[in-house]
Image (spheres, rainbow, N blue to C red):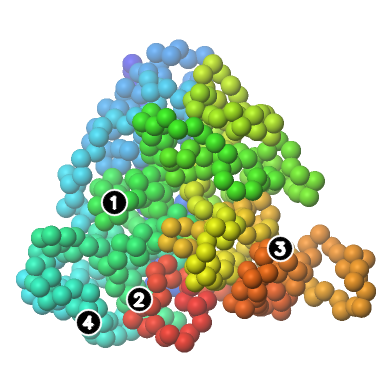
Amino acid sequence: MVRAKKIAYLIMGGFDKNYRRYTRITKGAQERFEKRLWNECQQSIRERINDYDQSVSDVVAELFDVMTPSQEPLELWVEMKQAYTKLLATHPQFELAETFYNSIICRIFKHGQIDDSMMYVTSTRCFLPGQDRLKVVNAFDTSGTVLNMFEEIFRVYRFNTPFADLIRDLGHLDDGLRHILSPAQLGSVHTVEMLKAVFYRGKAAYFIGRICMPDETIPFVIALRINRFHEIFVDALLTDRKDLSIIFGFARSYFMADTQYPAEVVAFLQELLPNKKQFELYMALGFYKHGKTEFYRNYKDHVEATNDLFALAPGIKGLVMTVFHLPSYGVVFKVIKDEFAESKKITREHVKDRYRLVKTSDRVGRMADTHEYVNFTFPLDRFDDELLTYLKETCAGSIEIRENKLIIKHLYIERRMTPLNLYLRDETDEEKIRHAIDELGLCIKQIALTNIFPGDMLHKNFGITKHGRVIFYDYDEICFMDERNFREIPKSDDPYALDTLSVAPNDVFPEQFEHFIVGKKHLKDCLKELHGDLMTPEYWRQLQAVCKEGKTINFTPYNPTKSFFYEPGKKKIAYL
């Protein structure tokens, strides 16, 4: 048991070291915001993601110096977990430390020993929200005027750079809240709570809290920006759960929000967003590894509580991925096929690299987050015959059947959306169709402004959310903008001129986009009307120039009309 304790201490030391680095990177978000270091913001996202895997590798290397895992008895691993569990008893990040331990065990055993006696398939304890609430929340006096309350908030949350016009901003907030709440509601407010951590992402910072009244509680979010003179200003006051849900959406980069009590912060956020699952909120905070742990637990509970069958996902079958779902569950499972169609001149490693690229990029609310799993286990009897046959035909190298289990050696899990081609096929409301086509154009443009060329832009590769937002989710052909040469089609009377044109592998002809992004003529016409510039090489070359200059565009996650500085005539792309 003494040896097991020493190894448990070693692993805990590795976790604590990793969390200190995580905290250092996260705390730097305030300075990056104040100094407008937007490129460094993106680098910090990559650094924080990559540092976790490096920390696991470092600890595993240390373990191999003191033990030979393949020769150790099962009793040692059980004792190690018991010793580690004792270290978790009062640890403020106990749940993250459990996941770190799981990562170590999975790395050593190649994800082949997912057993609760050796690792934390279930958590050591059920977290009770509220026990550390005062450590993560500030409460503000509501007995005075609304303006007094806002003044107090800005005395507590301080920056090292000035506000452009704080008196103006306080007036906007005062007027904004009075517009949202009636005098009777304002008079009934008994508590205003704000998370102590400021949430940073992109070019914005957020104070996140809630207004409590006897009969209801509403979100209370103050969105801040900073101008080119390094002066901060309040851009919006948000009290709609829909806005907050989109801010915490699955298609956005992870927040930088410094906290030593993540479970309490997640519990508070879940009270604001009851429709968000725990794993989604952990991921939004940047704890994506623990988000995967929470997802797996949620998935296991759901499978045990239901009896529907896994089946092929609705839509056109992919050329690179086999995609299936459990109809009662809101995700899809994506497995790389053993062989690709002739038109796909790519490799399996290339596909995995593209998914890693998206993971560490600014997804700006337009690219779905994906979570990579190894040796993921499914109950074999829950697969319908068509899906099981198709998996054996297309992904035999990635699956293994062991007794009553189907094990997929490598897969991605992603939020389920309605494929845009099916939505446009079935929708009859012309206004909704036009909105979806507008969203499609905006989605392509915004991805390009983050220096990513989407590649395969067929509308079947996009999904639409319940909020009507179009999201891209097929990444095997994405690349950086400077890796493509956007060309005009030569003018010729010969209808076969393009067939004889010398075309390099990186050449792209935007004038052809209208023929394959959407199929039916009325949809093509709508896309050309709303986003005709997408079909011109000049537009794409302009985007390339923006990316080459290293400019970072502001992508506001909430409705632009909520901004105190909204100008109705201004182009959408400037706000998004």
Q: Residue at x 38, y 23 (%)?
A: 116
Question: Quick check: can you spot residue 544?
Answer: no
Q: Secondary structure at mark 2?
A: helix
Q: Secondary structure at mark 3?
A: loop
Q: Residue at x 60, y 48 (%)?
A: 315
Task: Name the amino acid, label 1.
Answer: Pro
Q: Earlier in the sequence, mark 2 or mark 3?
A: 3
**Label 3 Cα crowd, 10 Å radius (few <14 / some 14-19 / many 20+):** few
* Residue located beneath label 2 in the image: 562
Provide residue 493's location: percent of width, then percent of height: 92, 78
* Residue located beneath label 1 in the image: 274
Provide residue 352's location: percent of width, then percent of height: 63, 45
**Label 2 Cα crowd, 10 Å radius (few <14 / some 14-19 / many 20+):** some
Q: Cα distance, mark 3 to mark 1?
A: 40 Å
Q: Cα distance, mark 3 to mark 4?
A: 48 Å
* Residue located beneath label 4 in the image: 175
